[in-house]
Amino acid sequence: MGFLFPGAFAFLALVPLLVLAYLARERPSRVTVSSVLAFRALRGFRKERFGGRPKFDWMFYAEALMLALAVLAMAGPFLIRTSNPVAVVIDNSAAMQARLPSGATRFEEALSKVQAALASESAGQVSIYVTAPAPHRIAPPFASVSQALRAIVRIPVTDSPNDYTAVTSLLQNLASGAEFRHVIFAGARPITPPVPARIRAIALSDPAPNLALGAFTLRREVFGASALHASLTVANFSPESRTVEVTISGDGARLASARESLSPGETASVEFPALPPKLVYRAELSPSDAFPLDNVAYATAGAVRTVSILFVSPAPGDAAGLDSIPGVAVKAVSPANFSLGDLRDIDLAIFEYGAPKEIPGVNSLLVMPPPGDPAFNFTVAPASELQVAEWRKTDPLTDSVNFRLLNLHAGEFIGQHSWMAAVVSGQGGALLLEGERQGHRYLATGFNPFPYLGRRNLPMSVLTLNMLSYLAGLGASTGGYHTGQPWLVPAGVESVILPSGRKVPASPGTLFTNVAAQGIYELVNGAGERTPRAVNLDNLTESDLENAPPLRVEPSNSPPSGQASTEKFSLSVWVLAAILALLALEAMIVYRRRRRVVLEA
């Protein structure tokens, strides 16, 4: 046994002080009295001298022992013992769900082989790590192999792909450090030779043909239309040509299907141009194969929900025409009644003849903004007549707009901006600017497209619909959330229902990390309303079971496998536990004695 702080034994000098404390106690003396009254009088004037022969009771020895144990704990006693720690790294990523010819999954086979490898180990601590969604240790080190064996069977496989850079870094650190005697790794990728001496690799990477679904996206091609355009990526990771069928269902009902012939290693896109509106869409790929996880994908119809617009203007009547657009809800307020809190539950804001005091946290359109506002700081030049001189030929904002028939009337030219770029320009400056800040889209126009007149002013209406579509995020993927990748909790959401049905709390503005499973997540707000969100594997690199690139772990100068190491085992905790036990025992005895004396009296 050794001591970390042997100088602490100097505090043993406190033990003689305990003896002095007992010598200074009041000593009883024998006095003969003739009455109780005399006894009370003598008691009031008794005098005791310091010193004499000490009479130590059991409490003195208990307190002396506790004092000595406290000094021992301060000295930091430890034992040096031989240790044979083992690290186990188990790949629990999505690729481990692929089935082997035997019928078992790679993950089940990995657990079986790791258990067999651990059963042959001698006594020692075992640390267990998993790789997905991110490499981490599942618990403090297990004290014995038997405990580790019981823990391994409870490890779940996830739908998340591996971050192979992080996995390689974990293996490199475990193999090069002095903490572990050796490392057992079971995964879907082999390790490139030479394998470090401390790593025992169990590779379950036999090539397997696989058909896979990749991205599943929905978009609305016409603002206000209910029909959706769906696009799915399909891949053939096999050495022969395959004909696949993709079937799409919505809210449980079959909607459409399509066939596609794929060459070996080919990736293609399957289009469904007009799907009826549903809440949740499910795509399924056939024929089935040994990796069923990537044969299914989900999407939600967030693009067909009502788009809420806040129209801030001194002329609220200019917003009236927007009500005629299908799927649009408009709320008009005057600048005097507007506050930033009004933007909390809307999709986009329109500021006519004005600008907010700070950049709004939603996609926004600024119509003929004033010069030098504090948020955007536009430079403008009024003009009695506006003419379009040039525009971007390939841009969603100018798509299908006949600028030669566009009559802009009077307005203003907008000067060069620090972070917004011109999309449409005239002879005196920009007429339409677009830019992005902190994930939000912003447009500014030097002309007024309102009120919306529909077919009565078709060129302007097409441009207005393009701007609203751009700000509403139309054409963007509604299935862009992936397993293992956290996302920000939207405002108002208080809990999330996982695909398993379990409900977990959530805080707006924080990262939601419990996304290890593929499927539909339901975001629940304070009123109990649920918004579905699709989360998919959507990782064709993970789906390619034919060409899994190996991991590269650099060899180190670590000692060879089998060499035991030593470690210091602290005894301070046990010493402190003994002190607490003595204190509890002393308190119980003293309490029982006092209680007995009171009862006898």
Image: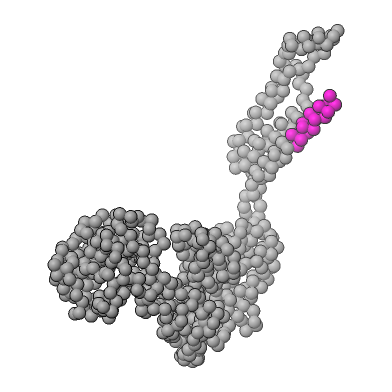
Quadrant of residue 48 in the image?
top right
Q: Is residue 510 above or below residue 212?
A: above
Q: Is residue 38 visible?
A: yes
Magenta includes 249?
A: no
Q: Is residue 348 above or below residue 57?
A: below
Quadrant including the N terminus: top right
Q: Which residues are magenta?
A: 585-601
x and y, in percent, of residue 576 in the image? 67, 41
Q: Residue at x 53, y 73 (%)?
A: 519
Quadrant including the C terminus: top right
x and y, in percent, of residue 596 in the image? 82, 29
In the displayed structure image, the side of residue 427 where residue 441 appears, left or right: right
Magenta includes 599?
A: yes
In the displayed structure image, the side of residue 308 where residue 207 appears, left or right: right
Quadrant of residue 185 in the image?
bottom right
* Colour pattern: one colour
